[in-house]
């Protein structure tokens, strides 16, 4: 009966480890493919003093405009 209890506990621990691995791997894939594009999410994880980010001469990252804002700006320049 002792071997059955050890096998049961071991199988539960392996199952928990497998589920944790799948969740972490899924998060990594979502992070690399989608979430890293948002500056707000990058600031939450890396902070605002990320030296590897692209910066302008003033040291501030440019905020991309939405398409409607770009169209409106282009029309106002004409």
Image (cartoon, helix red, strand yellow):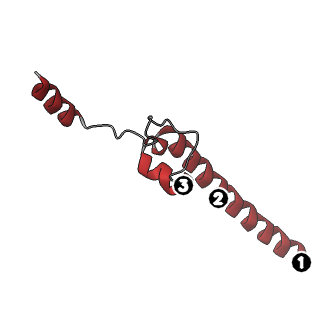
**Which of pointers 2 and 3 lies earlier in the amino acid sequence?**
2
**Residue 64 versus residue 78: which sits nearer the camera?**
78
Residue 50 placed where, x, y %? 56, 46
| Residue at image location 43% in from the left, 46% down from the top | 39
Between disc 1 and disc 3, the foreground one is 3
Q: Quadrant of the rendered structure where residue 13 is? A: bottom right
| Residue at image location 64% in from the left, 58% down from the top | 20
Residue 10 placed where, x, y %? 80, 66
The disc at residue 20 is 2
Residue 11 placed where, x, y %? 76, 64
Q: Residues within 10 Å of mark 2 (few under 14, many from 20)?
A: few
The disc at residue 2 is 1
Q: Residues within 10 Å of mark 3 (few under 14, many from 20)?
A: few
**Which of pointers 1 and 3 lies earlier in the amino acid sequence?**
1
Q: Quadrant of the N terminus?
A: bottom right
The disc at residue 45 is 3
Looking at the image, residue 78 lies above or below residue 10: above
Are discs 1 and 3 less than 8 Å apart at CB?
no
Most extreme residue toward the front, as rendered? 58
Q: Secondary structure at mark 1?
A: helix
Spatial separation of the CA atoms under disc 1 and disc 3: 46 Å
Q: Secondary structure at mark 3?
A: helix
């Amino acid at each position: 009966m002792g071997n059955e209890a050890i096998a049961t506990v071991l199988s539960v621990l392996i199952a928990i480890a497998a589920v944790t691995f799948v969740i972490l791997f899924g998060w990594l894939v979502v992070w690399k493919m989608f979430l890293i594009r948002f500056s707000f999410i990058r600031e939450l994880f890396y902070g605002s003093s990320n030296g590897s980010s692209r910066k302008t001469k003033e040291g501030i990252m440019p905020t991309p405009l939405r398409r409607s804002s770009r169209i409106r700006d282009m029309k106002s320049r004409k």
